Image (tube, grey):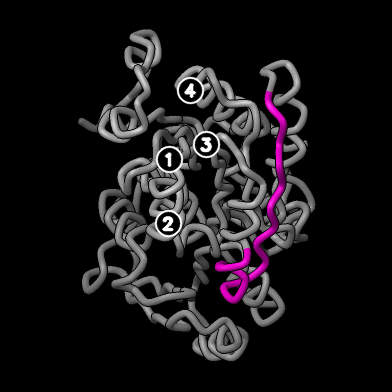
Amino acid sequence: MLGGPAVWPREVGAQPAAKPARLGVLLYSTPKGDPNLAAFLRALGDLGYVEGRNLTIEHRYAEGRPERLATLAEELVRLKPDLLFTLGGDVTLLALPAARTLPVLFTSSADPVQLGFVASLVRPGGNATGTTLLLDDLASKRLEFLKEAAPHIARVAFVWNPDHADNELRQAEQAAGPLGIEILPVALHGPDELDSVLAAARGARPDALYLVSSRQTVRNIPRFVSFATDQRLPLAGGWGAWAQAGGLLTYGPNLSEMMRQTASLAVRILNGAKPAELPVQQPTRFELIVNLRTAKTLGLTLPPTLLARADEVIE
């Protein structure tokens, strides 16, 4: 089971340095194609580390070709940065063998303990630490909000990647019974399976659609939202992008806040802290976002109590 979030003291920011700190960044896509990188660098700047002043950055990015990641990781390690930053569990998995003893900072939507990045969340024990977007009760809360928004639902197509180390299917199945919901798992391993996955979801004749956020589902948000719209299915997703694209609702971490937590860890490492001694951070702020336009399109009248609890209502 994942542990609770750690509480950090106020971050002191960058310390005076004789030479700029060197940051290596390894990405699945590109620097412009990953908004989380921009949020991370902004947060670093707020904490005193600014590129061109006291920070130099070496980027390597796979442009969506995962077979390139291991080679790119080796290139970055040869440059001997002070810290290697990886965005995504799939990226980190390929970077760690190359990094060996180099400090690694990751952000992952998967479980870093299951993936072997760290020994435990509280005591990572190796050369890596970071942030994970997982928390045990998120799946049950999303199902509760979905049932509250659409009380008629009884069969939920649950699209997930079995290769993505998370606990959402187990947690959703535990929560489903008391809510009067049957979970219909639909596995999505890779991009070549998208059409067959949508066909399988359609064939299951669900009342709603639940998307577990992973590399494959997030890259295809427009396709899933379009499918849900065509099939007139309420869609629940992991964070704001799903609702902003037209899904009915999302409940999950605030990604900007997660990037601030990640930047705080980066500063601590650049100032001399050891990743082995820095607990992996979990979400501390969660947002319920509801798309009222989508609800109206689906013929749903959302309860005032649900709207009152929403952090954002898209109208």
Mark before the other along the chain sequence, 1 or 3: 1
Q: Magenta segment: does it hold 189? A: yes
Cα separation between marks 2 and 4? 21 Å
Which residue position is annotated with label 2? Answer: 221
Q: Residue visible at 35% across and 48% down?
A: 13
Cα separation between marks 1 and 3? 32 Å
Q: Is residue 4 above or below residue 261?
A: above
Q: Quadrant of residue 304?
A: top left
Which residue position is annotated with label 4? Answer: 150
Cα separation between marks 1 and 4? 12 Å
Mark before the other along the chain sequence, 2 or 3: 2
Regarding mark 2 in the picture, which secondary structure is present there? helix
Residue neighbourhood size for the residue with mark 2, other residues' Cα within 10 Å, grouped as few (<14), some (14–19), many (≥20): many
Q: Is residue 109 above or below residue 181?
A: below
Magenta highlight range: 181-196
Res 30 visible: yes
Tell me whether circle 2 and circle 4 mark residues in contact (CB < 8 Å): no
- In the orientation shown, which residue stands out farthest toward the top? 305
Labels 2, 1: front one: 1
Labels 4, 3: front one: 4
Regarding mark 3 in the picture, which secondary structure is present there? loop
Q: Residue visible at 68% across and 33% down?
A: 136
| The C terminus: image quadrant | top left
Cα separation between marks 4 and 3? 27 Å
Tell me whether circle 2 and circle 1 mark residues in contact (CB < 8 Å): no
Towards the viewer: 310 or 278: 310
Task: Give x and y (percent) for residue 171.
Answer: 73, 33
Disc 3 marks a residue whose amino acid type is Pro
Disc 1 marks a residue whose amino acid type is Arg
Mark before the other along the chain sequence, 4 or 3: 4
Mark before the other along the chain sequence, 1 or 4: 4
Name the mark on residue 232. 1
